[in-house]
Image (cartoon, grey):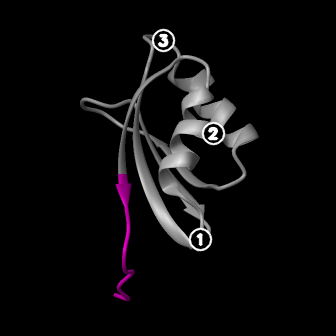
Amino acid sequence: MHAVFVMIKCELGTSYEVAAHIADNIEETSELYSVSGDYDLLAKFHVGDDDDVGHFVCDRLHKTPHLRDTFTLDTFNAFTV
């Protein structure tokens, strides 16, 4: 398993609805935050090492109602602090 971070833009006034849908329907969701700036939400997902991140984002996440745009950051290595 590895972490994938996705910045999410929502249609105006729908960020709580989008967050609830993601939390309730996408089992790979690890953490979900509301944020300020160009995006409305920051989501952390744990996907399988053999899973295609592009397919996960396009086939699962992008089907979320009222989701407008995403910016995906795939991870390679976790460092211990």
Mark in the foreground, 3 or 1: 1
Residue in the foreground of this view, choosing between 30 and 58: 58
> Residue at left 45%, top 13%?
11
> Residue at left 42%, top 46%?
6
Mark in the foreground, 3 or 2: 2
Mark in the foreground, 2 or 1: 1
Identify residue for label 2.
60
Q: Secondary structure at mark 2?
A: helix
Type of amino acid at the residue the image marks with label 2 = Arg
- Marks 2 and 1: CB-CB under 8 Å? no
Q: State the separation of the CA atoms marked 3 and 2.
A: 22 Å
**In x, y percent, where is residue 52?**
54, 58
Q: Looking at the magenta stretch, what is its main secondary structure?
A: loop
The reply to whether the magenta stretch includes residue 76 is yes
> Residue at left 61%, top 27%?
64
**In x, y percent, where is residue 56?**
57, 48
Q: Which residues are magenta?
A: 73-81
Residue in the foreground of this view, choosing between 64 and 16: 64
Label 3 vs 2, first from the N-terminus: 3
Quarter of the image that includes the N terminus: bottom right
Identify residue for label 1.
50
Identify residue for label 3.
13
Type of amino acid at the residue the image marks with label 3 = Gly
Q: Secondary structure at mark 1?
A: loop
Label 2 vs 1, first from the N-terminus: 1
**In x, y percent, where is residue 43?**
49, 47
